[in-house]
Amino acid sequence: MTTVNDNLLYLVAKLYYEQELTQQEIGEQLGLSRFKIQRLLTKAREQGVVRIELVPPTDQTCKDLESELQRTFGLQGAVVVPGEYRSEQVLRKILGLTAAELLPDLIAGRRKIGLGCGRTILEMLDHIELGGRQAATVVPLFGGMENIEPEFQVNALAQRLAAALGGEYRAIYAPVIAGSAEARATITSDPMIKPVVDMWESLDLAIVGIGYSIATYGSAFIRAISEKDMDDIKNAAAAGDVCRQMFSITGEPCQLDLNARLIAMSLEQLKRVPMVVAIAGGKVKAKAILGALRGGYTKFLISDEATVRYVLELHGEGASRA
Amino acid sequence: MTTVNDNLLYLVAKLYYEQELTQQEIGEQLGLSRFKIQRLLTKAREQGVVRIELVPPTDQTCKDLESELQRTFGLQGAVVVPGEYRSEQVLRKILGLTAAELLPDLIAGRRKIGLGCGRTILEMLDHIELGGRQAATVVPLFGGMENIEPEFQVNALAQRLAAALGGEYRAIYAPVIAGSAEARATITSDPMIKPVVDMWESLDLAIVGIGYSIATYGSAFIRAISEKDMDDIKNAAAAGDVCRQMFSITGEPCQLDLNARLIAMSLEQLKRVPMVVAIAGGKVKAKAILGALRGGYTKFLISDEATVRYVLELHGEGASRA
DNA sequence: ATATGTAGTGCACAAATGTGCAGAACCCAG
DNA sequence: CTGGGTTCTGCACATTTGTGCACTACATAT
């Protein structure tokens, strides 16, 4: 590999990207075949002669809403993406991307990291680029489901985050819902599982989604609970959940028999974690988000403008009624 | 134009350039049509959300040859592009590009700039990006030819350089060869032409190519000279020219009748310019380059490794023979 | 209510780009 | 010089991207 290449690569790259000639035209001008040019370009990209940089929207976040959230709910911080997104797909991706970019700052030396699951979390993982050797350990915050969808494979997500961080992860080989309270006790005291569950007591950071309907959890979850559980949930007026732990719009934990069978970090434990980042958006989730905020289950919220406005409006109404 | 766009643009750009999804795939994931994605990407590029940067080969020039040139011929500087280029097309483009990138430093505040012409100079102009409002004036260094080829349209080249610099230019409306010495006198004293010709006396910078054969100048030039002129040139053992002024391999100006008809900056004038940059490469030009260096007609040389080695070799031979 | 312009959409088609493969060229050890 | 490896080349073909156009939507002026 002579140095000729470097100059040639640069030249070809320049003609292609700056003068916007086609590979064909460049080939003709240089007396080389189109294919050669094509390969030179590929090489130029590989070797970093061509660098494609994406400029993140310059902090165009809704500062006003962010500080209002912070004040109203005693958060440590918030990031509100401006705009209204009709498409849930788009919103999820944008929140995931936003979260991915905030992550390095949010992690900042925290070692024991708990990770929830869900589509937004999955999107976030798609965009993380960190690589740096972080001395971090990632654990799932609740058990798994037989559900095949990748966004609910808690261990896989933890593994991906750990890989992106260059740290380690712990897998949990337990179901999110045990068959009975006794089964739960047996499972969580199993020597393979206990160490993971125990870590929930001493996390430095938790990254969670906010759920708004048991329907979200998919058929596997529903299959695991009884008619009575369903009735209980309805009666308790569950507005949403964090780590599968349900609460009402006022932030009160729902008292459910189901709770005794849940293998998931508890809301009390969550409140003791020094930093909890919740990522959630979309009007359908507004009540769930409000409940989580009122209950103090998160310390940092990543959401979107339209949703946050609606959440604050709902909160105001509730206040005036009270 | 809402801020929504910015986030969406960034997202789409990221999916396209970093995750290397196709526009089709992105469309499917986001629930938007391929065409929409296409247009978003175009917008992202236009708005600078996507920034494509080319990293110039990190100064991989032949330092040793450069300093040898400098020492041997008393140059103020030299840049030698490494490698051997078989294709003249490629070499010309690479030299042009190299020169274009050096230009800002070479100009550095110099106001009166003289410009030669030729294919390498043309390539250089293709790559200049400067835009800055330079208080510069660009003049051609010799008259024009009826030749249609764009690389010999002296005024057009001067105009292009001036445009790139954001400065002014002067056009010369005179032929490079007048019909007779008397005609030359008449023409150069014409009030439209004299001011331009006079500027050659007080240039701050000249940028020239080095010619190696009258054949290079094209048919229009040849048509303008007689059989006798051709014989003269052969007898004088012309090795090359700068600004159409011919010299031998030893750097001696050729004494030609033709000279009295040339409307071009003289070699004496050229030697008085504080900075002369010559751009030339290719083994066929070696003798011409050597003559120019020996004659002191340039103060800065931009060339390629193979040629420079050959030039230095030729120079060594000459020295040992003498 | 009716023109009238402006912006956005999807489509059919055209152009450009990317890829697996088969053969050529090269290079070195035996 | 010969066989076996690697690299380089061009090509047919498949994929991906870009574009002019006709059509819709919506807002503003008449």
Image (cartoon, coloured by chain):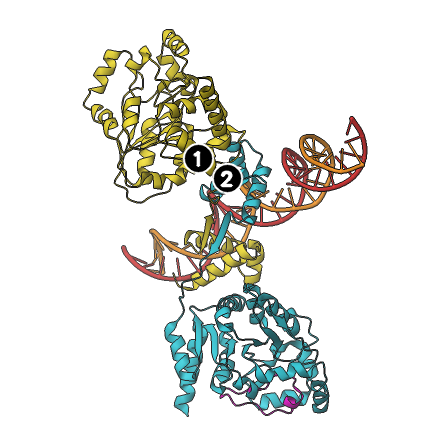
Chain colours: A cyan, B yellow, C orange, D red
- From the image, which quarter does the N terminus of chain B lie in? bottom left
Q: Secondary structure at mark 1?
A: helix
Q: Is residue B128 left or right of residue A92?
A: left
Amino acid type at circle 1 is: Glu
* Chain holding disc 2: A
State the residue position of label 1. Answer: B66
Q: Which residues are magenta?
A: A247-267
10 Å crowding of disc 1: few (<14), some (14-19), many (20+): many
Residue B141 placed where, x, y %?
30, 26
- Specify the quadrant of the image occupied by residue B78: top left
* Chain holding disc 1: B
Q: Is residue B58 left or right of residue A195?
A: left
- Near-viewer residue (B198 or B226): B198
- Specify the quadrant of the image occupied by residue B231: top left
* Residue B122 in view of the camera: no
Q: Is residue B233 above or below residue A46?
A: above
- Near-viewer residue (A287 or B103): B103
Q: CA distance from mark 2 to mark 1?
A: 17 Å
Rendered residue at 42%/68% (across/down)? A82
| Residue A248: in magenta span | yes
